[in-house]
Amino acid sequence: MAELPPIGIGTWENDDPAQCAESVRTGLEMGYRHVDTAEAYGNEAAVGDGIAAADVDREDIFLASKVASDSTGLTHDAVLDTATGSLDRLGVEYLDLFYVHWPMGEYDSEETLGAFDELYADGRIENVGVSNFEPDLVDEAMATLDAPLFANQVEMHPLLQQEALVDHAQEHDYTLVAYSPLARGKALELPEITSIAEKAGVSPAQVCLAWVTGHDNVVAIPKASIEEHIRDNWEALEFTLSPEDRDRIDAIDRTERQVDYPEAPWHR
């Protein structure tokens, strides 16, 4: 099974096609190898343009997309149609990872994941993922799929530490992919984060990313659209938190989601 790099480039809300393509190209040529997009982001074509423009071989890039619950839907045929559309928009022959974006709407584990098994068997996707799943839904998905479950993408940052999901990923040996790892900027203002950053001579973003990726089986996909931020996030790989500083961040006792819906599984 593939192993994800600790930091990838996220593209959520990277809506300007030219900027999105340029940020993907910049990230790949800087060293990023994991690119994350989704049908719902409306930027798959721009992401594909960035991949095509980068001086990086396609087989060296781990490309992920997602099928949404609120557009074409999550019925068996809709999943297959969305996968075809994503491949066409991205200009690629396969996806390294394809996710169920949200377990909402028409999501049905047997019907939806049955389509994922077909895509996996056909070679159109190389790994199956879920997103925004709680542990019980991950258990159900693993029991339903013929293909191995590769990843669960969830919001995770110092203000939403997701201990139960981290433990579950480690126990069952799949990857937890952390989106919004900076809490949409709110984590950068935490006194614990800023004081550690000042002491170490790094940015608050690098502290947050080092904390996220310091967990076994957890990687991060921070969104960045300008070269300065893309580089700052990438350079977090050069920084390691001390055990004492990790403990300080672990002790932040707050639960503040940045992405939430009434139908989300944690409200059931």
Image: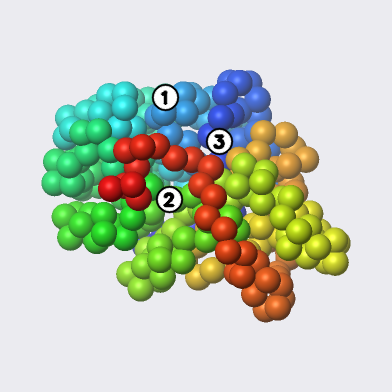
Q: Is residue 172 left or right of residue 163?
A: left
**SS of the residue at dot 2?**
strand
Name the disc covering residue 153, or none.
2
Residue under label 1:
89
Classify residue 35 as left or right of residue 184.
Answer: left
- Vertical order, 24 against 154 (above or below): above
> Furthest residue to the left?
110
- Using the image, tell me which numbered label, if any, was put on residue 70: none
Circles 2 and 1, Cβ within 8 Å, touching? The answer is no
Disc 2 and disc 1: Cα gap in Å? 22 Å
From this view, report whether residue 234 is shown above or below residue 49.
Answer: below
Marked residue nearer the N-terminal end (2 or 3): 3
Please, what secondary structure does the residue beneath circle 1 have?
helix
Label number found at residue 11? 3
Residue 132 in the image: x percent, y percent?
A: 38, 47
- Answer whether residue 136 is visible to the viewer in this image: yes
Q: Which callout, 2 or 3, points to the residue nearer the camera?
A: 2
The amino acid pointed to by label 3 is Thr
